Image (tube, grey):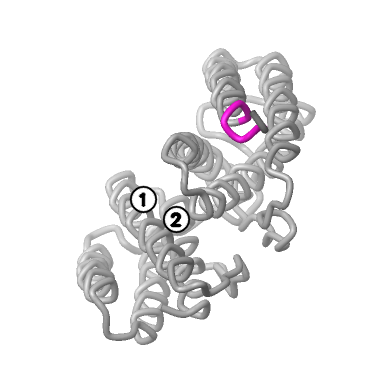
Amino acid sequence: MTPAIFERKHALWLNVLFSSFMIEDEAVKSELYDHAQIAFRHLRWIARDLAENGTAYTYDRDIDLGRPADSADALYTLIAAVKSTMALYPDSPLSARMTTDDEYLIARLEALRARPGSNTPITAFDRHRTLPGKTLDSAQTDALTLFLFEESYKEYELILIYAYMQNESRDLLERDIYQDLIDESQFHLKSFGNMMAKMGILALPRPLHEQTYKITDIEAFIRNGISEEENAKEQCRSLAEAVKDGELSAFFDFINFQESYHIELMKKLLAQVSPK
């Protein structure tokens, strides 16, 4: 494997993931999200292969979601992205696994394009800033919009940082904690991404600088992370109070309480990495 393949797989993971957010058909969304999780596993396996061979990699990426007119257009673009990524794979057992996964993904994308209703317009980028069945005033809408942009980036950032640190660690407990934190952030990113698409404000999170994930002081990083989680709890609590909608308030309280356990996980991680 090469850093170039890692970069392309990173872009492909985002492409599949954000396609799952932008398409409204629930069955298609669910299937695409499953394939995004597979693409993320590919990404981690490539990272592991590179690390085992002493090859550095970055989270640089080259991706443009464009503005697909409808679901069929989005799926067509995604098929092209899968094929162009597959063309880079070398001859290896990992490549063989990724190739069969990607070939099946292409087959499913083609089948989904052929389904009735695949020409449903995509409204994930039109900035209408409303949620189905919800009546929010401008202040509530602004607060929700700002929260979603900030937190979707944060969750994307955390997924990549924890994946990088997990790949660097040789301690089983640390790796398990990182995996728990990755899984939690994946769920949050999915929740926020789908909500952004419903509001017409879907956007890719900005890229990460190398200094963000190449951590030199792990203890300081974790202490800062605990502070950030406490701040995230406060943001969720404030938003739950601000939106004046029972269902939305309950959702953001739910996220708030999840952040509480993230803090406990990070405290456990801190105890593991602190000098004895």
Relative horizontal placement of residue 33, taking residue 199 as reference (left or right): left
**Compared with residue 194, is residue 274 higher up or lower down, i.e. above or below?**
above
Q: Assess whether mark 2 and mark 1 are in contact (beta carbons under 8 angstroms).
A: yes
| x 47%, y 54%: residue | 22
Magenta residues, dominant SS class: helix
Residue 12 inside the magenta-drawn segment = no
Q: Which quadrant is the N terminus positioned in? A: bottom left
Residue 271 inside the magenta-drawn segment = yes
Residue 200, label in figure: none
Helix, strand or loop at label 2? It is: helix
| x 47%, y 80%: residue | 2
Q: Which contiguous range is marked in magenta?
A: 270-274
Specify few, some or many for label 2: CA neighbours under 10 Å numbering under 14, 14-19, or 20 or more: many
Relative horizontal placement of residue 26, taking residue 107 as reference (left or right): right
Relative horizontal placement of residue 60, taking residue 31 as reference (left or right): right
Q: Which residue is mark 2?
A: 17
Give the percent coordinates (x, y) of residue 73: 41, 71
The residue type indicated by label 1 comes to Tyr
Residue 266 visible in the current orientation: yes
Give the percent coordinates (x, y) of residue 214: 67, 57
The residue type indicated by label 2 comes to Leu
- Estimate the spatial distance between the alpha carbons at disc 1 and disc 2, rounded to whole Å: 6 Å
| x 46%, y 42%: residue | 171
Q: Which quadrant is the C terminus positioned in? A: top right
Residue 69 visible in the current orientation: no
Marks 1 and 2, the one that precedes in the sequence: 2
Give the percent coordinates (x, y) of residue 37: 36, 52
Q: Which residue is mark 1?
A: 33
Helix, strand or loop at label 1? It is: helix
